[in-house]
Image (cartoon, rainbow, N blue to C red):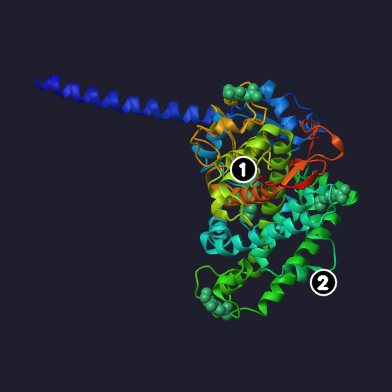
Amino acid sequence: MEIFSIFSSWLLTAVLVLSMFLICRYTLKSNRSSMVSPKLPPNPPKLPIIGNLHQLLGKPRHLAFSQLSQEYGPVMLLNIGTRSCLIISSSAMAMQVLKDQDQILCSRPISKTTKLLTYNYVDAAFSPHSNHWRKMRKVLVSEFVGPKRARLTNHVLLTEVEIMLRSISLHPSNSAVNITELFLAIAKAMICKVAFGSNYRKREQLLKGPSLEVMLDEVMELLDPSLSDLFPWLGPIIDQISGRNHMLEKLFSNLDAYIQTYVDDHHNHIGKVDDDDKDFLHTLLELSSIENASHDDRFTIEEIKALIMDIFIGGIDTTFATMVWAMSEIIRSPRVMQKVQSEIRNCAGRKQKLDEMDVSKMTYLKIVVKETLRLHPPAALLLPHESLSHCQVGGYDVLPETMVFINGWVIGRDPSTWGENASEFYPERFENLDQVEFRGVNYDMVPFGGGRRTCPAIKTAPATIEFTIANLLYSYDWKIPGGEKNEDLNMLEEGSLLVRKKLPLFLVPTKHNWED
Ligand code: HEM
Ligand SMILES: *[C@@H]1O[C@H](CO)[C@@H](O)[C@H](O)[C@H]1NC(C)=O
Ligand SMILES: *[C@@H]1O[C@H](CO)[C@@H](O)[C@H](O)[C@H]1NC(C)=O
Ligand SMILES: *[C@@H]1O[C@H](CO)[C@@H](O)[C@H](O)[C@H]1NC(C)=O
């Protein structure tokens, strides 16, 4: 008995030790082998050196990605020069990236353009994941889009909408208004006035150099990866010869000068402005003044300028492109136009002008804007993410430093989510859905991204768009010039980082005739 028990405990120990040894060996080996041959996502056939680049040329990026994904699936890998890019094309996979693996896939790739424009990544939108990014994002959220700035933001919106309506009323009757131009002016003023104060236009008129609009168009072009980013060996030489480097440096120096003008102006006025009138730049400069040095949130001038750069790049073109898409879709569908106009007019009744309280009751208008963002997310591929370390998406291995593109455009039009008429403008599809913050519980649409990189303006930007559209539709009826049929409005897209309507939208207003 005793011998037996001694023997058995000896045997037990031996078995335990042996099995632990085997388990260790096995896991070590399987770890090593999974690193040696990771299970990579499907990869379309590629050419030497350029990789899959040739499959992307000559069409808008989101369409090229969409076509490839039909063949290779919702998770695929493209090699573009020396970069590996993960392309995500379904809501289930977007959810894995933006939610399940958010802590690993929340960085941003570096590029020559973003490095220069963000003063070497001291900003919030383009900087890789870090504590510094967190600090910059926090100040953007609390000082630009947060409730502290809501009073100024509302005030600016009311003023700008009034300017828009006045310019329409002064327009020669029966002639077409350039709606694109009006929307661009509002979107720009919403950013610039909240950033620099309400007399930013006066200051701007004195500035030399290209206009902010023109500079931002160039930014969108140059944000596309350069050859230097994709081909570190030969690319820099080609970028030099082709003039791209020169164009980028010139653009940066113009933008920097533009922002610096306002910084200099503000330096002279610090402390002289009432709290309610303080703009974003004013607050940032106060927070970083020597007097307030002990403050946790001190910022360098470059950090402040980088934040301004972020809101210029992230806030103006996205907002105005969405407004143009919304108005175009409404015009194209007489049914939607009739319905949304009667909601606006019923909610507000007959009065001088709309206020925000009226608009907050307009539920159909809200889903019209939402449907617009489903079909036309202006940042069709969001902003590129990058992996911080190894992880898995859809059962495939994703290696560190992989760029991740989420094709929000194709996700919003996926028939397996949205049904047969996925590509139709049909706001009623949201009528009985209690969707969480645009993306839905299942990441059915992702116009503002998701996870820790979610657009900070996810609440404020839609409100701006709703209010502007409501005002346009309240006092005027609209039609397409030249007797063309509304349904035939040209909806061609252009752009790759920012997808907007190619042709400007021109519409003819008639003052609404209240039947009373
Ligand atoms: C309709 C209007 C807008 C749309 C559709 C939009 C969309 C987006 C998208 C898709 C992203 C990337 C999310 C991701 O990487 O997962 C983003 C990021 C960002 N947006 Fe917006 N945006 C809009 C308006 C604005 C406005 C008005 C601002 C001005 C404050 C703004 C500032 C930013 C910033 C700073 C980021 C970077 C956030 C980060 O990387 O942490 N956006 N936006
Ligand atoms: C309409 O406005 C847009 C935006 O400002 C501008 O690019 C376009 O040239 C204008 N179209 C015409 C015909 O003036
Ligand atoms: C320091 O901060 C306070 C409040 O934030 C502000 O009133 C004051 O003007 C700031 N000082 C300077 C020199 O900016
Ligand atoms: C689109 O689909 C919805 C729901 O499936 C349906 O009620 C609606 O009538 C369809 N719209 C059109 C224009 O066919």
Q: Badge 1: how crowded within 10 Å, few (<14), some, or many (20+)?
A: many
From mark 1 to mark 2, how far is it between C-alphas? Answer: 41 Å
Q: Is residue 507 toward the left or the right of residue 68 in the image?
A: right
Q: Hey, what amino acid is under mark 2?
A: Leu
Nearest to the observer: residue 148 or residue 230: 148
Tell me what residue is drawn at x 74 percent, y 31 percent: 63
Q: Badge 2: how crowded within 10 Å, few (<14), some, or many (20+)?
A: few
The part of the image, by quadrant, that contains residue 141 is bottom right
Rendered position, 395 above or below 379: above
Rendered position, 152 above or below 501: below
Q: Is residue 38 toward the left or the right of residue 486 in the image?
A: left
Counting from the top left corner in percent of width and height, residue 230 is at 76, 42
Asked whether the residues under the numbered discs 1 and 2 touch, taking CB atoms below 8 Å apart as contact, a structural biologist would say: no
Rendered position, 461 above or below 337: below
Q: Residue furthest right?
A: 241
Q: Is mark 1 within 8 Å of ligand 1?
A: no
Rendered position, 319 above or below 485: below
Q: Hey, what amino acid is under mark 1?
A: Glu
Ligand 3 quarter of the rendering: bottom right
Counting from the top left corner in percent of width and height, residue 269 is at 65, 79
Label 2 SS: loop
The residue labelled by disc 1 is: 386
Q: Is residue 410 toward the left or the right of residue 93 in the image?
A: right
The residue labelled by disc 2 is: 206
Quadrant of the snapshot with the N terminus? top left
